[in-house]
Amino acid sequence: MSGHSKWSTIKRKKAAIDAKRGKIFTKIIKEITVAAKIGGGEIEANPRLRLAVDNAKSVNMPQDNIDRAIKKATGELEGVSYSEITYEGYGPAGIAFMVESLTDNKNRTVADVRHLFSKYSGNLGENGSVAWMFERKGVIVIPKQGKDEDEIMEIIIDAGADDLQTEDEFFQITTEIESFETVRKALVDTDLEVDNASLQWISKNDTKVSGEDAEKLMKLIDALEDNDDVQNVYTNADFVDM
């Protein structure tokens, strides 16, 4: 079940940079707000909210920030209403993109996303244009820190995980949506630190990119992720020699 994904490493490094910039806080607060709005403010009774709060705690978000976001969503405090929109498109070298957003202004966000695709040699597509190239999966990241791979493998297989990728500094576990919470809970119950757990779009078949194409793709990805309305960016790119 082990393997290597250069994109996994790049995404984790980018997430660390975002955390330093404070961008990750903004994205998680939006997710907490939407989760609480849809499923209520009781953390234990709302799996999506519980996951968002766990991720908030993993990046040391203050409890006051978490509580305030929940109260805004439930109406105890005045807040903003966000819409969830997923955009599809193609980047340089024909690489497929799935872009998840949470926005309080749909017209602004679609205009911004379309502009960024155009600016960096890509184009925004119609709904369904690339979604067939991806699968919705659960992804759990655990820092290595001397942990035994065989021990983790045993835990996640028993819990129903699909795959384990071993990277330089972390393990990345992939699950079906149905077994995602079971696997996450099995890891937490054995006192293993979970860096991040989320539902993601995983490409069915990656396309290798390198050199100038890879540089262009990273510029588009960076530009999209710098947009305040964009939550997550997924591609079917397999970055080589980066």
Image: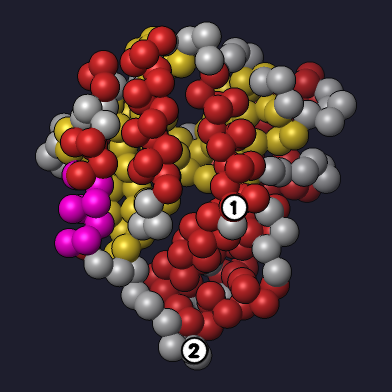
Identify residue for label 1: 21
In this view, the residue in front, 158 or 8, is 8
Please tell me whether residue 91 is drawn above or below residue 88 in the rendered image: above
Instruction: Give left or right: position of 239 versus 162.
Output: left
Q: Quadrant of the N terminus?
A: top right
Hey, what amino acid is under mark 2?
A: Leu
In this view, the residue in front, 1 or 207, is 207
> Which residue is drawn at the image coordinates 61% and 34% (left, top)?
13
Residue 100 in sight in this render: yes
Give the foreground label among 2 and 1.
Answer: 1
Quadrant of res 152: top right
The x, y position of residue 211, in whole percent, is 41, 10
> Which residue is drawn at the image coordinates 22% and 61% (left, top)?
108
The x, y position of residue 215, in whole percent, is 40, 21
**Secondary-structure class at tag 2:** loop
Please tell me whether residue 156 is drawn above or below residue 215 in the rendered image: below
**Secondary-structure class at tag 1:** helix
Identify residue for label 2: 77
Hey, what amino acid is under mark 1?
A: Arg
Instruction: Give left or right: position of 171 versus 126.
Output: right
> Which residue is drawn at the image coordinates 42% and 67% (left, top)?
34
Quadrant of res 196: top right
